[in-house]
Image (cartoon, helix red, strand yellow):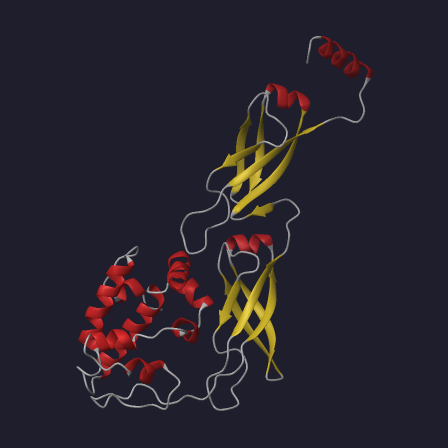
Amino acid sequence: MAQDYYETLGLKKGASADEIKKAYRKLAVKYHPDKNPGDAKAEERFKEINEAYAVLSDPQKKAQYDQFGSAGFHQRYSQEDIFRGFDVGDLFREMGLGGDIFTQMFGGGGGRRSAGGFNFRQARPQRGEDHTMEVTVSFRDAFNGCEKRVAFKRDGKREELSVKVPKGIADGAKLRLAGQGGTSTTGGPAGDLYLTVRISPDPVYAREGDDIVVERLIRFTEAALGTALEIETLDGTKRIKVPAGIQPGTKIRLKGLGFPHQGKTSRGDFYVRINVRVPDQLTGTQRELLEQLGKKGL
């Protein structure tokens, strides 16, 4: 399971930028390799601390992490994305620690060692190319979540994988399959496969954000006098009251019956859009009655 970045830094979600920086400085000093030469556990802890700070100190990455949670965030960001543009060398020097340690640990250099002799990273071969493809799921599968069997070609060979599509996924969202992209030609790690999710339209329901909208036609008399309707939602049949005098195009809301919000326990809403059916043919009696109502100002 991916680490909780806030927990790694000993913080609660919603911590301020100053709180994040203060917590990072404290832990970085404690677990810095210059202070823990040859300690493998300290090395791993130091790497975790830096990864957490790389995300939480970047407003854009932090917003994505807060919105989608750890699992959803790692579907969108690779390890290299996380550390891109991140450098704390100056901060280390301010604390009187090895200023080039981060470059040694994550940078593209040739695997130098710190003063304590701690080897963080040897130069790595280039990783393979990332591949992309589209996968289509039904409206209801996007609502409920599903397992999708995906066939693709990798290095000229056909492969199949079972992919978990999370409930509430949006059209155009990407799922990352780590290591399923192109093979490296220099002995490095394989690239990733990114699946762009396409949701097929439903004949009954429409999606607006995480809300679901369904259209219902009622008679003029029902609109004028009010009525009750039974509505088939994706959670079963619900009965709603249509108030007297409702206007065409008005939406009646069923709270919390829409799509699940990604990374959250809450859901969107379900709306019934009311339209009024105008008859294209009238019987003699109906015409006579309507003419009388017209004379009464209706």
Q: Is residue 2 above or below residue 209?
A: below
Q: Residue at x 48, y 45 (%)?
A: 268
Nearest to the observer: residue 91 or residue 52? 91
Residue 36 horizontal/vertical position (percent): 18, 83
Residue 40 horizontal/vertical position (percent): 24, 83
Tally the marks. Answer: 0
Nearest to the observer: residue 288 or residue 96? 96
The reply, left or right, for residue 49 in relation to residue 267 is left
The reply, left or right, for residue 21 in relation to residue 229 is left
Q: Residue at x 58, y 70 (%)?
A: 150
Q: Residue at x 59, y 53 (%)?
A: 139
Q: Quadrant of residue 291?
A: top right
Residue 190 horizontal/vertical position (percent): 49, 82
Residue 192 horizontal/vertical position (percent): 51, 76
Q: Is residue 55 above or below residue 117?
A: above
Q: Quadrant of residue 18?
A: bottom left
Q: Is residue 113 above or below residue 149?
A: below
The reply, left or right, for residue 80 in relation to residue 289 is left
Quadrant showing the N terminus: bottom left
The reply, left or right, for residue 106 in relation to residue 40 is right
Quadrant showing the C terminus: top right
